[in-house]
Image (spheres, rainbow, N blue to C red):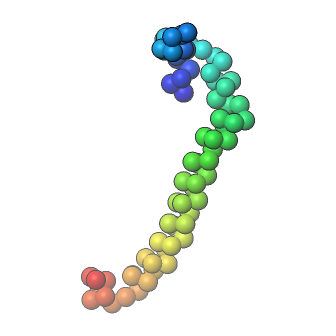
Amino acid sequence: MLSAFFERDPLGFFNVAFVRDNYAKFYSSFYFTVSLRPLWSGSLGSLVVVLLAFPAMYIIVDLHRRGQLF
């Protein structure tokens, strides 16, 4: 959202100005899809880790004390 406070001048530099058009560009279908992709992959990765961690935790807790120390 930092891009909402900058606009480009003709030379390619950034000027400090609040620009509402940048919000409209960010919520367009392309940028919205691109920004949702990392959220989806992060959520999927977290789910896989949780699904693998709980059975491993259960197995480790169920071991005798000597087996838990590796």
Q: Judge by depth and name the residue closer to the eye, 45 or 60.
A: 45
Quadrant of the rendered image containing residue 36: top right
Residue under the point 54% across and 53% down:
42
- The x, y position of residue 63, in whole percent, is 37, 88
- The x, y position of residue 67, in whole percent, is 31, 88
The image shows residue 69, relative to residue 46, as above or below, that is: below
Residue under the point 64% across and 17% down:
20
The image shows residue 64, relative to residue 45, as above or below, that is: below
* Residue 17 seen: no
- The x, y position of residue 3, in whole percent, is 54, 23
- In this view, which residue lies farthest toward the right? 29
- In this view, which residue lies farthest toward the front? 11
Relative horizontal placement of residue 11, taking residue 33 as reference (left or right): left
* Residue 25 seen: yes
Q: How many marks?
A: 0
Relative horizontal placement of residue 55, taking residue 24 as reference (left or right): left
Quadrant of the rendered image containing residue 25: top right
The image shows residue 50, relative to residue 58, as above or below, that is: above
- The x, y position of residue 32, in whole percent, is 66, 37
Relative horizontal placement of residue 69, taking residue 39 as reference (left or right): left
Residue under the point 50% across and 73% down:
52
For the C terminus, the image quarter is: bottom left
Residue under the point 51% across and 67% down:
50
The image shows residue 24, relative to residue 48, as above or below, that is: above
For the N terminus, the image quarter is: top right
